[in-house]
Amino acid sequence: MVFPLFTLRHVVLPLMTQAYLLPNHKIRSAHMIPRYSRPDMVAIWSPETKFKIWYEIEAHACDAMADLGVIPRENAEAVWKAKDVEFDVARIDEIEAVTKHDVIAFLTHLAEHVGSDMARFVHQGMTSSDVLDTCFNVQLVRASDLLLADMDRLLAALKTRAMEHKDTPRIGRSHGIHAEPTTMGLTFARFYAEMDRNRARLINARAEIATGAISGAVGTFANVDPRVEEHVCEKLGLTPEPISTQVIPRDRHAMFFATLGVVASGIENIATEIRHMQRTEVLEGAEYFSVGQKGSSAMPHKKNPILTENLTGLARLVRMSVIPAMENVALWHERDISHSSVERTIGPDTTITLDFALNRLAGVVEKMIIYPENMMANMHKFRGLIMSQRVLLALTQAGVSREDSYSYVQRNALKVWDNNADFKTELLADADVRKALSAEEIEEKFDLGYHTKHVDTIFARVFGKA
């Protein structure tokens, strides 16, 4: 659809802007909408937080330079007098409208608080990327800490449900078709193991991104002592970047966002399984349906898996950042800013979305309704067919060739598929099968407990020994 210019300027764009407003009507993030945002993560990416980190970088750098005798101590102390200042975002934006440079706009505003004479050594020997990159990494580290806490909540929920349904039988499926018995506990346990691996990946990604650089133009430290960088990084909980150009190397960020993409895929994996469980013809599990909730505007009977469907979509948004982050690795010479616009978007968008998604999934798992009776009914829907492998193996062990064993079992299995026959009854009536196996031996092959005898071993591997 083509919108008239008037519509775009006077209707569509104002509505888009309103979608990004929080209740206090301040634009806190120019990206992720409040519907999929949680306040603690949004706060990390607010302009106020960003400018506060910029200030801390500059103030700590002044301290280090004063210690080295590069600038007077009173100038460094004057900068710290602004530590309780609420930086005026609107004023900084006003200055930037003239300077067309965000860091210079901030430094100009800082000088308005500190005094131009006392602030003249702020940013001494530094370049904008020293502030921007170090701040970005501080924000990503803080975002990582929230995401790790989110994952702890999800892991706790998965473990609780795994223990609760450790021995609850459920049919396993391959290609969407009944395969062999498993348990609902094992389903939750494998998701726990996947998310536990993802947590370890995120810890490594956090370490990967927790570096800072105060190395000056093209990264040579020509105008700023390396000890300044060491001091600033120590104060901010970072480690000095071993070698930077005018920017911190973007392979670190590529690794970080790739990890978030893997976590998102894990979320989708769990969400997809729950969506399948909730299908009417399966109904082995379902999202909690609250009092007063409505499933459809047209069909009052509907209970839809809306949360896990939403999580599938949110996972796509998180993964959407991975390729741009990879493409940011290749910059011209010592620096260009082709990465900048990308990171201003994917930094807040991806972490805010993933924070929301992890908490939504944890809530789904915590409140999820499980239907053991339906699981058992589904398992027996094809009247013993799922025990075919046990019969196949028993025939080979009784001396029948694998080719003949497979043929005997399959021809009886097809009767179940085609005629709704009973698998065990057909086997007992098959002369070739009975030549190799007694009725008792055939009967034993339909013992459900055979398939769950190693559940304790698997649980010990996943959760550790009790």
Image (cartoon, helix red, strand yellow):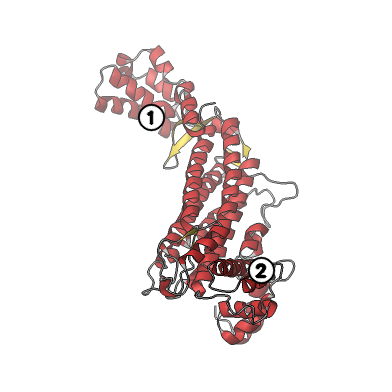
Q: Nearer the viewer, residue 87 or 312?
A: 87
Tag 1 secondary structure:
helix
Q: Is residue 201 above or below residue 335?
A: above
Q: Which residue is mark 2?
A: 80
Question: Could you say where residue 200 lies in the image, as x and y percent from the top left?
Answer: 48, 45
Q: Quarter-wise, where is residue 391 in the image?
A: top left
Residue 42 appears in the rendering: yes
The C terminus lies in quadrant: top right
Which amino acid type corresponds to the residue marked 2 in the rendered image? Trp
Q: Nearer the viewer, residue 324 or 241?
A: 241
Per the model, the C-alpha gap separating discs 2 and 1 is 80 Å
Question: Could you say where residue 446 lies in the image, as x and y percent from the top left?
Answer: 44, 21
Question: Could you say where residue 87 lies in the image, as x and y percent from the top left?
Answer: 68, 73
**Number of callouts:** 2
Q: Is residue 437 left or right of residue 451?
A: left
Tag 2 secondary structure:
helix
Disc nearer the start of the sequence (2/1): 2
Q: Any mark on residue 170, and which?
A: none
Residue 305 appears in the rendering: no
Q: Which residue is mark 1?
A: 413
* Local crowd size for mark 2, using a 10 Å CA cut-off: few (<14), some (14–19), many (≥20): some
Q: Nearer the viewer, residue 396 or 29?
A: 29
Q: Is residue 324 above or below residue 265?
A: below
The N terminus lies in quadrant: bottom right
Q: Is residue 285 left or right of residue 323?
A: right
Which amino acid type corresponds to the residue marked 1 in the rendered image? Ala
Q: Is residue 82 left or right of residue 280?
A: right
User: Which of the two marks, 2 or 1, is nearer to us in this view?
Assistant: 2
Residue at 57% x, 80% y is 104
Q: Marks 1 and 2: in contact by CB < 8 Å?
A: no
* Local crowd size for mark 1, using a 10 Å CA cut-off: few (<14), some (14–19), many (≥20): many
Q: Is residue 270 above or below residue 172?
A: below
